[in-house]
Amino acid sequence: MNNTTLTNEQKLDEIYTIIRANERRRMQASIGRIVKWVMIIGFVSFVASNPEIFVKKLTEIIQPIVMSQVEDMMTTNKDALMESVKDMLPKE
């Protein structure tokens, strides 16, 4: 605003402009939230209706990692694993 005195009508116009801008921002924010939730629900429903796509892809990615970790664990802790297996077996 400038330093000149404003009439009451000009002040009301400025207040009205500010209120309209706030309402517009609030409306855009609520529309954005609605769009976000629609997209999330759509994605979840797609995953729920086609789980084999995602499970297969995740299995392809995770299985080699898990297998290499198990192999590493078995090679580094071979003696300890053998002892724990022997302890679990019934003794004669």
Image (cartoon, rainbow, N blue to C red):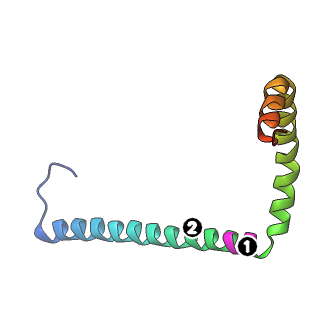
Secondary structure beneath dot 2 equals helix
Which of these two is toward me, 35 or 68? 68
Q: Label the magenta part by its dominant secondary structure.
A: helix
- Pointer 1 residue: 48
**What's the CA distance linking mark 2 and mark 1?**
18 Å
At 67% from the left and 70% from the top, the residue drawn is: 44
- Pointer 2 residue: 36
Sort mark 2 into few (<14), some (14-19) or many (20+) by Cα contacts within 10 Å: few
Magenta residues?
Answer: 44-48
Based on the picture, tell me whether residue 18 belongs to the magenta stretch: no
Q: Is residue 22 above or below residue 45?
A: above
Q: Position of residue 75 (x, y in %)?
A: 87, 26
Q: Amino acid at mark 1?
A: Ala
At 82% from the left and 41% from the top, the residue drawn is: 89
**Occupied quadrant, residue 80:** top right
Q: Position of residue 27 (x, y in %)?
A: 42, 72
Q: Earlier in the sequence, mark 2 or mark 1?
A: 2
At 24% from the left and 65% from the top, the residue drawn is: 14
Q: Position of residue 72 (x, y in %)?
A: 84, 29
Q: Amino acid at mark 2?
A: Lys
**Occupied quadrant, residue 8:** bottom left
